Amino acid sequence: MKLNIEQLQSSFPENIWLNLPAINTVENISKNMVFTNSTAYNNAQINDLCLTVVLDWIKNNLGLDKSEVKLRQVEDIASIWDAITGSNITIGKTKIILIPTEILDTEEFVVPQEWIDIPNLVGSYYLPIQVDWDNQLIRIWGYASHNIFKNKAEYDPIYRTYSLARDYIISDLETLWLAIELGLQEIADIPSIMDLSTGKVEQVLEKVSNPSPYSPRLELSFTEWSGLFGNPSLRQELYQKRLASAVDTNSLVSVANSKINTTNIYEQKAIKTKIVDLTKWLSDQFTESIELGWQTLDSFIFNTEINLAYRNNFSSGSNRDNSIQRGKLIKLQMQVDTAEFILLVAVTPEAEDEVKVLIQLHPNSDHKFLPSGVTMSLFSEGNTIGNPIISQGDDIYLQSLPLHCSRNTDFKVKISFRKASLIEEFTIT
């Protein structure tokens, strides 16, 4: 059921509800920008949309002169949007970070680490901006200070984000406007970023300047990445190098030559992850896979007895005595939300130079069943292994047939749901 803005304002009077304009009419600062991939392009369009609508509302409703409300880093905002979501504005002397999201859940507020831990990007206050395509609305549903994020938020070292529970988010935005009027600054102490040597700059730029369908932010340690991304001139150099690479590979995306389409915004190429060498698991070498998000099964919460039973069956069916099992949280970003699954892989040595691999896909801990239409497909040397496995809505998990792999075998697992997909690549060396 679609809700109008009056109904929502009545139910949530402390929040700000704004009508979503015709999206193709919003070509503010991004209209002449170019980006290195479609993910960055979509990111920029959503940020520009939210930025335009929110700035207009602030200027028109808080009695401020337009010169008092402005976008910071406007000269190189394209280099920011090419890598992360979010905009940095000032209202008077107060720095405000706008974080747009198409996720309608308000149980937590997730912010990329860059906005929290890079000194020249941090703000005093952070606002979650929801884009509700179904009801054609934008909602500002609260705010939190930088100090609260540093002291109360949960840090995710895999995706390098801070997640703040709803309990710590202030929904009454009138108190924010008062804090701004009083000039209150709530920025926690954070360490300065590391200055990269000339040799180190060349090394990290070489590593992250190649074309990719996603941001390079997780390809470096945060120390290296913050030293690069937190330096405006180096950030611009990274952006220019990636643009040049995108031109060479014909993957450059220009906002001026394309229009956002909400029906296919997330119909992108499947995101690929780095190759995991399963042979190393059998030798108790897990450093690389841990960095890629693979964990022991005990690290995951299987919230039903049924799921727990099948997890145990997964282990026993793989010969528990000499089998190695690991799991990874899979996140697929779609138009209005994120789908989360747990991918389990068990590898067991068999005959000489051969191993058996078993793969399962589970719902995350918040759900009992997989949603209908989740697909798990396996490939090797460009060919499909068996038929794709598709959930029917009452499946507790999906499981592949056992793969009997000889040495020097590569294979891929593709997880697809709606218009989003991700590929995990594996090798047996």
Image (spheres, rainbow, N blue to C red):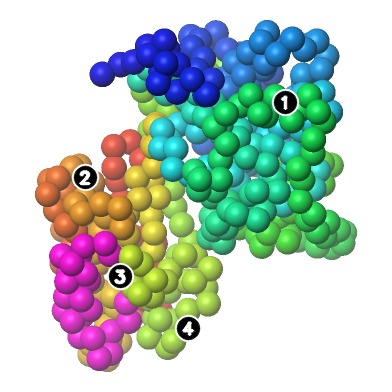
**How would you rate the neighbour count of disc 1 (Cα within 10 Å): few for under 14, some for 14-19, many for 20 or more?**
few
Q: Which of marks 4 and 1 is in front?
A: 1
x%, y% of residue 243?
A: 67, 36
Say what secondary structure mark 4 lies in.
loop
- Residue shown at 78% from the left, 55% from the top: 190
Horizontal relation, residue 202 to residue 266: left or right: right
Image quadrant occupied by the C terminus: bottom left
Residue range corresponding to the magenta coloring: 302-325
Whether residue 121 is visible to the viewer of this picture, yes or no, is: no
Q: Label 4 belongs to which residue?
A: 285
Disc 2 or disc 3, which is closer to the eye? 2
> The residue under label 4 is which amino acid type?
Gln
- Disc 3 from disc 4: Cα separation: 15 Å
Residue on which the image places disc 1: 178
What label sits on residue 371 in the rendered view? 2
Residue position marked by numbered label 3 in the rendering? 345
Q: Estimate how packed mark 4 is, as few (under 14), some (14 to 19) or many (20 or more) residues with alpha carbons within 10 Å.
A: few
* Residue count near mark 3 (Cα–Cα under 10 Å), binned few <14, some 14–19, many ≥20: many
Q: Which of 171 and 337 is in front in this view?
A: 171
Residue 162 screen position, x and y as percent: 58, 51
Q: Distance between the residues labelled 4 and 1?
A: 54 Å
- Checking the image for residue 93, the label placed there is none
C-alpha distance separating marks 2 and 1: 44 Å
Sequence-wise, the earlier of marks 3 and 1 is: 1
- Disc 4 vs disc 2: which is toward the camera? 2
- Give how far apart the Cα atoms at labels 3 and 1 are: 52 Å
Left or right: residue 238 versus residue 100 is right
Q: In this view, does 162 lie above or below 137?
A: below
Which residue is nearer to you in this view: 37 or 298? 298
Q: Is residue 147 above or below residue 133?
A: below
